[in-house]
Image (cartoon, grey):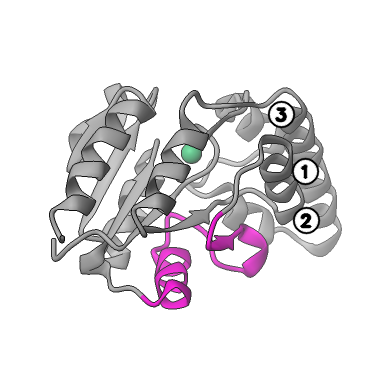
Amino acid sequence: MTGLKAVLFDMDGTLIHSEYDWPAIRAELEVDGPSIIDALNALPALQRTESWARLEAIERKASLGAVMVEGADDLLRLLTEQGVKTALVTNNSTENTEGLMGRFGLSFDVVITRDSGLYKPSGAPLVEAMRRLGVSGAETVAVGDSHYDVRAAREAGCSQVIIVNGGCRRWGKDADHAFENLRDLGDFLDKQSRQRR
Ligand SMILES: [Mg+2]
């Protein structure tokens, strides 16, 4: 790591808690492949429209009950103060993402949603975020809560991938670091960003 210049955040489960029962959602949408987005996009036109509408309704409902993860706002403020750039890279929709950011007063230098056509577990949305931020993988850390975040960050060449919150127990072993809460992550990133001074 050459010095921390940017942090790429996942949204759901990382900075925002939303209730998603993915096994139930997969059953409802009749998806058994690894990626729900890919599975829906591969459907015949009429069915594709219907299934996307159902997924969007589920997501809208989940967003209504969403809460900010404790410390998310403090963490983003700390990074801004340290001159570290931030990006939000989410497989959620632009509509939901902007609604949640507005409700919780969160802002980022770059926001990339699935509506860009780029989505995890591909590394492409993270690569695009780094391109827009003007940073290299060596200067960038990715933070998420699932194996999709780990896979995408590895493919994108981020220097470190960090798993937080409830994802720790399940996916922490695949990451470079795992923290149970955002305060511990903040302490860690604070030290990393000071190292370059
Ligand atoms: Mg997530």
Give neighbour class at mark 3: few <14, some 14-19, many 20+ (Cα, 10 Å): some
| Callout 3: SS | helix
Q: Nearer the viewer, residue 134 or 16?
A: 134
Amino acid at dot 2: Arg
Using the image, determine if residue 20 lies above or below residue 93: above
Which tag, 1 or 3, sits closer to the chain's start? 1
Q: Nearer the viewer, residue 99 or 79?
A: 79
Q: Are marks 2 and 3 in contact (CB under 8 Å)?
A: no
Q: Position of residue 174 (x, y in %)?
A: 21, 40
Give the extent of the magenta segment: 108-134
- Residue under numbered circle 1: 56
Q: Position of residue 48 (x, y in %)?
A: 78, 56
Q: Is residue 65 left or right of residue 26?
A: right
Q: Quadrant of residue 190?
A: top left
Q: Which residue shows up at 52% across the image and 36% down it?
A: 73
Q: Is mark 3 within 8 Å of ligand 1?
A: no
- Residue under numbered circle 3: 62
Q: Are marks 1 and 3 in contact (CB under 8 Å)?
A: no
- Residue under numbered circle 2: 48
Q: Locate the C terminus and report the quarter of the image it occupies.
A: bottom left
